[in-house]
Amino acid sequence: MFWLYPACKCPDKESLMSNDPFSLFDSWFKEARETELNDGNAMTIATVNADGQPAARMVLLKGYGPDGFVFYTNQQSRKASDIAANAKAAILFHWKSLRRQIRIEGSLSTVDDAVADTYFATRSRDSQLGAWASDQSQPLDSRETFEARYAEMKTKFEGRDVSRPPHWSGYCLMPDRFEFWQDREHRLHERRTFEKDGASWTKGMLYP
């Protein structure tokens, strides 16, 4: 089950010492939403294509929970092509205001159509139209061409709801590894890990 952002609540010390990586993520994420100036839900996602070439880019986290971490994209994009060839990926959150990072590794799968439809309906109308107008990651001869396509979509959907494009959906990363990184003075950082072990998690620490 996925949910959009719950109401903010400052984490207490007990939650920060949790043995559950999802609970610890929730605590850090809620705090980041209050301290980051822009896009506290921004994360890097790194993928690898069929030739072994890695690529990384920023996306926005749109849902999370024990079932995984969800983001949305054009399924004709480079990241989607990489995922089709290799469903393993890594995501990274870096919150400069808190001097923290969270690294998460796991496998990706597409979300159900109903989940994608529900999220798409929450986007601004301009963003919905942009999803139709953009051939994401494909060559573009000029900005004017894209703006003309956007205008065409605006006319096409005038007076009615904008449906979700068939090539636009979400992906869910199901983690098998977490690393929580906390900055410390003199680069004596704290690194806590959680690795999937059947139905439970094995907790550990790394040298900085």
Image (tube, grey):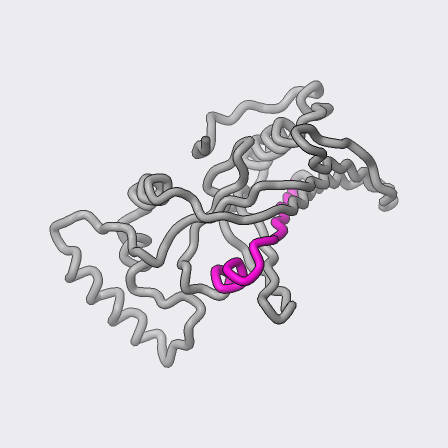
Question: Which residue is located at x 59 percent, y 59 percent?
Answer: 47
Residue 161: x, y in percent? 19, 47
Q: Is residue 83 left or right of residue 112?
A: right
Q: Which residues are drawn in magenta?
A: 79-97
Q: Is residue 81 magenta?
A: yes
Residue 56 appears at what percent x and percent y?
59, 61
Q: Is residue 186 left or right of residue 70?
A: right
Q: Quadrant of the N terminus?
A: top left
Q: Residue at x 63, y 51 (%)?
A: 90
In this rendering, position of residue 9 left or right of residue 1: right
201 relative position to 3: left or right: right
Does 111 appear in magenta? no
Q: How many marks?
A: 0
Give whichever of 11, 195 is nearer the camera.
Answer: 195
> Quick one: which residue is furthest to the bottom in this view?
141
Residue 29, image x, y percentages: 58, 34
Quarter of the image with the C terminus is top right
Which quadrant holds residue 133? bottom left
Task: Kindly indicate the quadrant of the structure image that contains residue 177.
Answer: top right
Q: Which residue sits furthest front? A: 198
Name the residue rendered at 77%, 36% in the picture: 192
| Residue 201 percent coordinates (x, y) | 71, 31
